[in-house]
Image: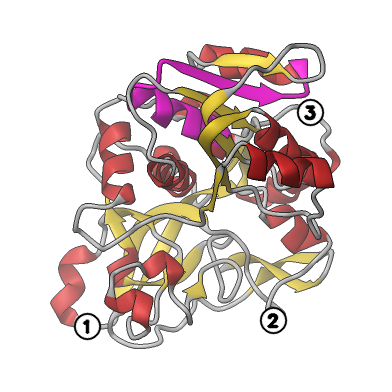
Amino acid sequence: MKAYRLHAVNDLRYDDIDIPQLPDDSWCILKVHAAGICSSDIPRVFTKGTYHFPTIPGHEFSGEVYAVGNDKYKSLIGKRCGIFPLIPCRHCDQCNKKNYEMCAHYDYLGSRRDGGFAEYVAVPIWNLVPLPDSVSYEQAAMLEPLSVALHAIKRGEVKKGQKVAIVGTGMIGIGAGLWAKSKGASTVKVIGRSEQKRELVECMGLDYVDSSEEELGEYDFVLEAVGTPSSISEAISITAPGSTALLMGNPSGDIQLSQDVYWRILRKQLTVKGTWNSKYDGSNPSDWTEALNAIATHSIDVLPLISHRFKQEELKEGLNLMHEHKQPYCKVMTIWNE
């Protein structure tokens, strides 16, 4: 099969390798049909690397079950599925509470083990998210970022009538804005620093604010979705007294806050929270089942968030577009096994 293997930092090769083996009979082989490129894939490929080499990146993907390790699962063959990429240990304290996203010993498709930038990938059957006919492979590959966005809005306890601001104009930031709107927020502002993103944000029915030119005001809930010192400072500065700021952006490096920003947290008596990943529990209700239902019922339309599409052999073009910021983008999608 063809797969993109990261052999070292900034050394991604389109290799011919064998279809993966199943670790045990609770796993299956998925034939990949769509894989999104996450912003976290950019440092992983170009600057920071991952846990071991070679590794196949890619954690936002979907496909059909190609093979199983036990005949009792043979009815799954041909099933169209999205994939929850985190593999919990199932034994630690948080796993025992079903807080799998906080597992102390988790594995992860696309970083700690081979992921979805390949024609075939091994995944646990528990991580399969069966798709209704109304949900396409591209939509299913958006389940992961949409679920992460929903988890953030739930962590922020967004309520009807609240004023909400999202600092960041990426896929998850815009997705969080859509979820906040669906939860009844009276105001949802997506804050960025580029007029090039205004059209995309506004076409999704959200208000865009250019922080370099406009007054920002104050909000009952602020989600920081960038991960830089300046974006965190901005989020703290626009959080209303007694309100909540939620940090979600992957940090690009060490974060240092100025004394003024720290004092704002104290004097405004802010609640500052963190969020990571999303809640998932197989077929039981979770962020993933809610996100899938929202896509299936068209209450949230994710397809307009796909700004670029590339064939599997063109994946490096998508990575370079994001790495070099050649064009404005939201979600870059790659199509596999056409």
Residue beneath the point at 80% across and 58% down? 253
Instruction: Find the distance from the CA under tag 1 to the CA under tag 3.
Output: 46 Å
Closer to the eye: label 1 or 3: 3
* Circles 2 and 3 in contact, beta carbons < 8 Å: no
Magenta-drawn stretch contains 82: no
Residue beneath the point at 56% across and 76% down? 113
User: Which mark, by number, is residue 52?
Assistant: 2
Q: Identify residue type, mark 2.
A: His
The x and y percentages for residue 198 are: 67, 15
User: Where is residue 281, by image quadrant?
Assistant: bottom left
Instruction: Find the distance from the CA under tag 1 to the CA under tag 2.
Output: 29 Å
The x and y percentages for residue 146 are: 44, 41
Indicate left or right for 5 with 259 as reference.
Answer: left
Which type of secondary structure does the marked residue at label 3 adopt?
Answer: loop
Residue beneath the point at 70% across and 39% down? 264
Q: Nearer the viewer, residue 231 or 202?
A: 231
- Which span of residues is magenta-colored? 173-195
N-terminal of the pair, mark 1 or mark 2, is 2
Instruction: Find the distance from the CA under tag 2 to the CA under tag 3.
Output: 31 Å
Closer to the eye: label 1 or 2: 2
Q: Is residue 282 above or below residue 332?
A: below
Magenta-drawn stretch contains 186: yes
Q: Identify residue type, mark 1.
A: Asn
User: Where is residue 158, by image quadrant?
Assistant: top left
Q: Residues within 10 Å of mark 2 (few under 14, many from 20)?
A: few
User: Which mark, by number, is residue 327?
Assistant: 3
Q: Nearer the viewer, residue 148 or 130?
A: 148
User: Which mark, by number, is residue 172?
Assistant: none
Residue at image mark 1: 70
Could one spot residue 45 in this view of the protein? yes
